Amino acid sequence: MDYSRYLTETRDANHLRMRTLIRLRTLAIIGQSITVLGVAYGLGFPLPVASCFLLIACLALLNIALRLQYPATHRLSPSTSTLVLGLDILQLSGLLFLTGGLANPFSVLVCVPVIVAAASLPARNIIVLGVTAAIAVTILAFFHRSLPWYPQEHFDAPLVLIAGNWIAIVSTAAFAAFYAYRVSAEAEELADALMATEFALQREQHLSALDGLAAAAAHELGTPLATITVVAREMERSLANDERYGEDVQLLRTQSERCRDIMRRLATLSATDEAHMSRLPLSSLIEEVIAPHREFGVEIAVTHKNDQLGEPIGHRNAGIVYGLGNLIENAVDFASTKVHVETLSDANRVTIRIIDDGPGFPADVLSRIGDPYVTQRSRSNDPSAGGLGLGLFIAKTLLERSGATLKFTNQEGAGGGASIAVEWPRNAMEMTAEVEI
């Protein structure tokens, strides 16, 4: 599956769903109807009931039109969602105009369409709806009918109360919309990052499975290739002294035997890997992880400290290999001259420390390391370069799936540098099987 295509589909999926919008507006219709009836006939306040229900009927008709136009699972485009929510603001503003303006205690409901938009629409659409709501409440502050009240009394809301309600509505809409937008954006980033983690793990497991596929292909090709070799030998016996074809037949026979040798080596890959790579001592795992990074001009020193139980032996886990490889790659990228990889194991724990002599983690980033898209660390030889974003999130997620805990710190002293400690319970490290996707 193509990851960029998935991200596009995810963004489309975050559009406002028709079923959700219809349900919200149905609740609004019911609530508005009950409120109008309760105020007019329950409390006996003078209220333009016909005009109010005309506006409520407009909302109901729009709801019916949307239900007929689109299926329930349809997701509206941002522009259509903005238009529909803008109409909701105008409809509610009309009701408030008829029932006291900002003196009406339900005037705070003008914030609702803006908050709904903040959870599902782009920032520019949220701003459009926020400005629309602000204009609406500003007009309602000056132009509105009297608040329904006891017939024998007349209620005039003081200016300070109207001003306070205006400030409360605008600030509530702004704060709640910003909060909903940030929560939605962070959830989307986390979902995208987790999907990238799955793709990285899937790729690592795919590479691990190639040896087995090669062995299977060699097995399938072995029989026809053996037939070709036998036929080539028979032809060589018959045409060995033929001036026209003797040399070609000999070449055919030698090349078929060469192919058989290649197939034989491929056929042994799966068995070799199963015997020697499915379970690895910790030292062999570390060497496999750091081997691709030794040719970048940075020294990688490795030390092992084991107790009397010796080093742990565990399953070759694609998630652990990828996660540790990513951490070491980052350390090599940001180191000045040296990276030190240290393993410690005892009866209870297995710890791998990765220490570089680079600039270390900035203080403002250290508390957020492991969140997706944190890209604030700069290389010592290139301050403008970024790093430690999605890759580190993927590594952290894969290692934590295997039972590890990670700790990110900076080294004390003049040398400085970043330090990453990855720790497993010993029994989890030794028994860890392949991470499932």
Image (cartoon, grey):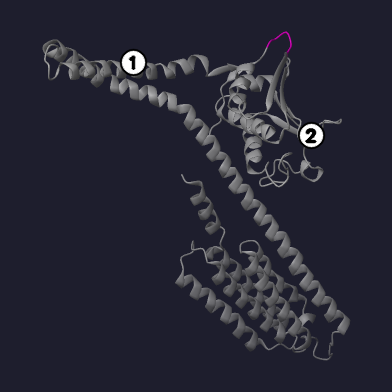
Residue 22: give x, y in percent of width and height.
55, 68
- For image coordinates 19% across by 20% down, the residue present is 248
Whether residue 201 is in magenta: the answer is: no
Q: Farthest front residue?
A: 243
Residue 152: give x, y in percent of width and height.
83, 91
Residue to which mark 1 is pinned? 261
- For image coordinates 53% across by 79% down, the residue present is 61
Please tell me which residue lies in front, 199 or 97.
199
| Res 318 label | none
Residue 14: give x, y in percent of width and height.
57, 58
Is 104 positioned to the left or the right of 320 in the image? right
Q: SS at mark 1? A: helix
Q: Is residue 209 depicted above or below 157 in this figure?
A: above
Q: Magenta: predominant secondary structure element?
A: loop
Q: Is residue 97 visible?
A: yes
Quadrant housing residue 423: top right
Check contact, mark 1 vs mark 2: CB within 8 A: no
Is 37 positioned to the left or the right of 212 in the image? right
Q: Is residue 152 depicted above or below 429 in this figure?
A: below
Question: Label 1 sits on what residue type?
Answer: Asp
Q: SS at mark 2? A: strand
Q: Earlier in the sequence, mark 1 or mark 2?
A: 1
- For image coordinates 67% across by 52% down, the residue present is 186
Residue to which mark 2 is pinned? 409
- For image coordinates 74% across by 80% down, the residue present is 137
Q: Which residues are magenta?
A: 306-310
